[in-house]
Image (spheres, grey):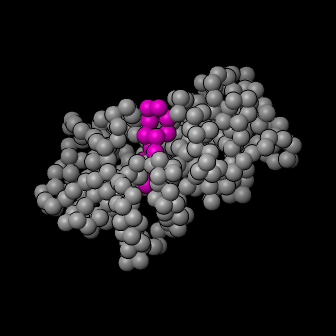
Amino acid sequence: MICFKDITLEDKEIITSRIFPNDCCNCELSFANHVSWRFLYQTKYAIVEDFLVLKYLSEGKEIFMMPIGKGNADHIVEILIKDAESQDIPFAMHAACHFVENQLSDEMRERFNLMPNRDFFDYVYLREDLATLKGNKFQQKRNHVNRFMKTYPNWEYKSATPELIKLCIEKEHEWYESNEDYRHQNIDSERQALLYAMNHAEEIGIKGGVLFVDNNVVAFTFGFPINHKTFGVHFEKADINYTGAFAMINNMFAKDIPEEFIYINREEDLGIEGLRKAKMSYNPEFMITKGLLTIRS
């Protein structure tokens, strides 16, 4: 039986050292996500023959994630299957479809059913696209940004510092208390993850950006590198009373993200129609097809 360990802030190096060199850029692989959402998913990890193995709870069911490491993962998956059998639980593994194709042999893949779920596909963009908004396909986004700058000439963008993060926390509490629609969006879990990330920003190593109008916080965003070429944007909040605030913080943060990152992963849409439309409107470079693997009967 594999000895899994609860994820803590102290595990950052051992986890990121396995993930960063890898080309798989699922948002679920971000250490910031792991540690901020562990209260909900009870995510645990283990190192098995130098592969990183993760598992979490979803609707009360234990689910593994595709092992992260160098080379073929057939043997590690066999170990996970035996671990599930030893606990008398059904084996299930969440993974990106292309990663399964690259890391498992044809023989191993034939043992599984793969069930892609469109609601959980990641949207991945070129960082340069979101930073420059060049070309006809971004004309509408450029219009939103230009309109914001003209409407609010006293705007300012700043990279997040500990002092600014405190302002963001205060602003989030203010929005929550004053906006009934915001409170009724079933966001309690997201708020808990967001507040944990902001309160432990330095230990996690998250990067953020803050948008001001007349020295008042109107939007903020936070993210973390998923791997060596992909940066994940995990939280983004804006005051909807400021037209174009979401477009503006998106654009400014993309400019602020180091150029070493080719891609920006803005996560899934969860099947929410408005969110899907908004994410598609930014013209993703590609989407990460993800789904659940179960053993064929």
- The number of numbered badges drawn on the structure is 0
Q: Does 206 sit left or right of 22 as displayed?
A: left
Which residue is located at x 47 percent, y 54 percent?
A: 201
Q: Does 47 appear above or below 218?
A: above
Name the foreground residue: 94 vs 154. Answer: 154
Kindly identify the residue that appears in the image at 85 percent across and 47 percent down.
87
The location of residue 207, given as percent across then percent down, is 40, 48
Determine if residue 147 is in view. no
Give coordinates of residue 154: x percent, y percent. Answer: 15, 61
Among the 4 quarters of the image, the one containing residue 283: top left
Q: Is residue 46 or residue 230 the one in the foreground?
A: 46
Residue 92 included in the magenta stretch of the image: no
Pinpoint residue 18: horizontal percent, then vertical percent: 60, 33
Q: Quadrant of the C terminus?
A: top right
Image coords of residue 132 (percent x, y): 24, 38
Range of residues picked out in magenta: 224-235
Please indicate, yes or no, whether residue 193 appears anywhere in the rendered image: yes
Q: Residue at image x 84%, y 41%? A: 1
Most prominent secondary structure in the magenta stretch? strand
Query: Which residue lies at the image location 38% right of the left edge and 74% below the top edge?
Result: 174
Is residue 131 rendered to the left or right of residue 230?
left
Q: Quadrant of residue 220?
A: bottom left
